[in-house]
């Protein structure tokens, strides 16, 4: 069964430009290496009302969602509280999350279970913890929604672990092919009718068009991807039509 994957990326520092987001590219890469693809991504600042509304909408679906950021204990971290509010449940101190921190405290004298640290073990009722091998401060899942830290060195291994332990049966389910043609001297408006025809006649493929203006002239980088049985035929149709219209092209 095909599942939809989404990403929610939270933090004022990203929207203000103080920090460059790297989660989106890594999520695409991590899914892609397993034959999966990301269907959507949403960005939010540290605004609880917006985060709650987004989570309510997302929880109403059966999507698999990775949320990055906002699960710490500082005043600008709202994700844990917002997830609980969206589910209309209370936060509670998860005993497994506390146990993981306590285990670290026994071997790391500089790590103590302060009230602030224990706040990071407060998850929505019904949550399942996500182990954090980096520092033993767990993240959490609510069904197929997985709430990860904003720090890449923690979040990315946790995302890979979740995929490999919970969703391995989804890997490489859908055969996939992609072919790219680079068309010179043409604008998108010159080929829209061809694109529409190909999309209509080959429902198992997706087409994307990326126009560019270069010093030597304009080009279109056009990708046809999807069902391996349909992609070569659809691309052949595109090449033939481009040739008929007199535009030079090359395959990438």
Image (cartoon, rainbow, N blue to C red):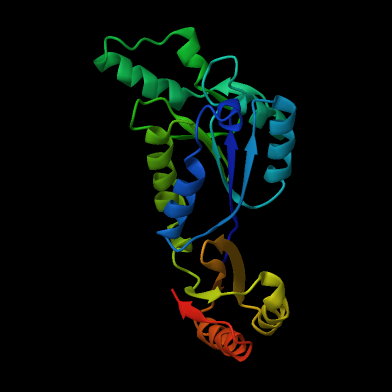
Pick whichever, 184 or 11, lies toward us: 184
Q: Residue at x 40, y 11 (%)?
A: 113
The percent coordinates of residue 2 (x first, y second) are 57, 65
Q: Relative to 36, is 54 on the left or the right?
A: right
- Quadrant where the N terminus lies? bottom right
Query: Measured along the vertical axis of the image, is residue 8 above or below residue 195?
Result: above
Q: Relative to 217, is 132 on the left or the right?
A: left
Query: Measured along the vertical axis of the image, is residue 28 above or below residue 130?
Result: below
Q: Quadrant of residue 49?
A: top right
Instruction: Single out the residue that lies furthest toward the front.
Output: 215
The percent coordinates of residue 224 (x first, y second) are 55, 74
Q: Residue at x 42, y 35 (%)?
A: 152
Q: Quadrant of residue 195?
A: bottom right
Query: Measured along the vertical axis of the image, is residue 11 above or below residue 75?
Result: below
Q: Visible in this render: residue 131?
A: no
Query: Measured along the vertical axis of the image, is residue 239 above or below residue 153?
Result: below
Pick whichever, 201 or 2, lies toward us: 201
Q: Visible in this render: residue 244?
A: yes
- Quadrant where the C terminus lies? bottom left
Q: Residue at x 43, y 36 (%)?
A: 155
The percent coordinates of residue 28 (x first, y second) are 48, 53
Pick whichever, 41 or 171, lies toward us: 41
């Amino acid at each position: 069964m095909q599942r939809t994957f989404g990403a929610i990326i939270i933090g004022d520092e990203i929207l203000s430009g103080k920090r460059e987001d790297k989660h989106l590219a890594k999520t695409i890469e991590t899914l892609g290496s397993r034959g999966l693809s990301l269907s959507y991504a949403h960005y939010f600042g540290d605004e609880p009302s917006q985060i709650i509304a987004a989570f309510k909408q997302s929880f109403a679906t059966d999507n698999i969602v990775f949320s990055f950021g906002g699960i710490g204990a500082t005043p600008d971290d709202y994700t844990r509280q917002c997830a609980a509010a969206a589910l209309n449940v209370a936060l509670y101190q998860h005993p497994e999350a506390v146990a993981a921190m306590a285990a670290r405290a026994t071997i790391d004298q500089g790590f103590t279970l302060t009230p602030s640290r224990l706040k990071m073990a407060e998850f929505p009722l019904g949550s399942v913890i996500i182990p954090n091998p980096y520092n033993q401060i767990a993240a959490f899942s609510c069904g197929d929604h997985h709430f990860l830290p904003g720090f890449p060195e923690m979040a990315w291994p946790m995302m890979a672990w979740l995929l490999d332990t919970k969703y391995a049966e989804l890997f490489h389910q859908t055969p996939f092919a992609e072919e790219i043609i680079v068309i010179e001297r043409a604008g998108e408006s010159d080929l829209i009718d061809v694109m529409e025809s190909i999309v209509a006649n080959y429902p198992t493929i997706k087409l994307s068009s990326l126009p560019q203006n270069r010093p030597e002239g304009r080009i279109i980088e056009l990708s046809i991807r999807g069902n391996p049985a349909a992609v070569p035929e659809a691309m052949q149709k595109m090449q033939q039509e481009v040739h008929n219209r007199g535009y030079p092209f090359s395959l990438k």
